[in-house]
Amino acid sequence: MRIFLNRWQAVAAADVVGGVFIAQRDLLKTLRSHVLAGSGLTAEIAAILFELYLAGSRLSSPEHVDADGYVSVRDLRTALGYSAGLLSRRIGWLCQRRWAEVKRAAPSIAQGLHGNCQKVRITESGKGIVAPVWRRYDELAERLLAGISPSDLAAHYRINEFISDKLHAPRF
């Protein structure tokens, strides 16, 4: 909730960006209490498993997923915005539980992969852990966005994508 936002005036850019922070804060609380509750997963681990789950179910862009459902660790790090060290530790944790598996990626100059690059995919056990969490996430999203027109949803999606692209631009 914004205390000083007058909804009848033109919305300033700072209000839009501030609204993103407020929504993120509120959404994270709800995710922890309604989506992740009882799963034993943290938001960080769930985010990794969600990405791998979607990649394994072929809902991800085929340019980032190989024929066996593996995603390069570099692409996963870029998608999540995690540091290399944090992501490596989290993937190690997932592999210890056999929820994910890692193998070395074939070197590819075209893709910028050297001989030490790794790729990761979710296992059947990992899918079993994250599938009910994903269902609760999907149900929450449906409830939160019920009644919003498809055109407004599409506009919101495009704005979020535009903001994210700008923040990842080389000269931001």
Image (cartoon, grey):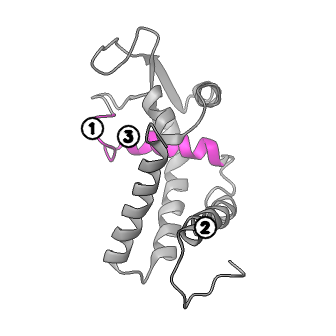
Quick one: 128 or 61, which is closer to the camera? 61
Which labelled disc corresponds to residue 23? Answer: 2
At x 38% / y 72%, what residue is drawn?
A: 153
User: In the displayed image of the protein, which residue is found farthest to the top?
Assistant: 115
| Residue 115 screen position, x and y as percent | 41, 8
Q: Residue 56 magenta-drawn?
A: yes
Of badges 1 and 2, the one in the foreground is 2
Q: Amino acid at mark 3?
A: Ala
Label 2 near label 1: C-beta < 8 Å? no
Q: Amino acid at mark 1?
A: Pro
Which labelled disc corresponds to residue 55? Answer: 3
**Which of marks 3 and 2 precedes in the sequence?**
2
How many marks on residues?
Answer: 3
Q: Amino acid at mark 2?
A: Ala
Which labelled disc corresponds to residue 62? Answer: 1
- Dot 1 lies on which element? loop
Residue 124 higher or lower than 149, as above or below: above
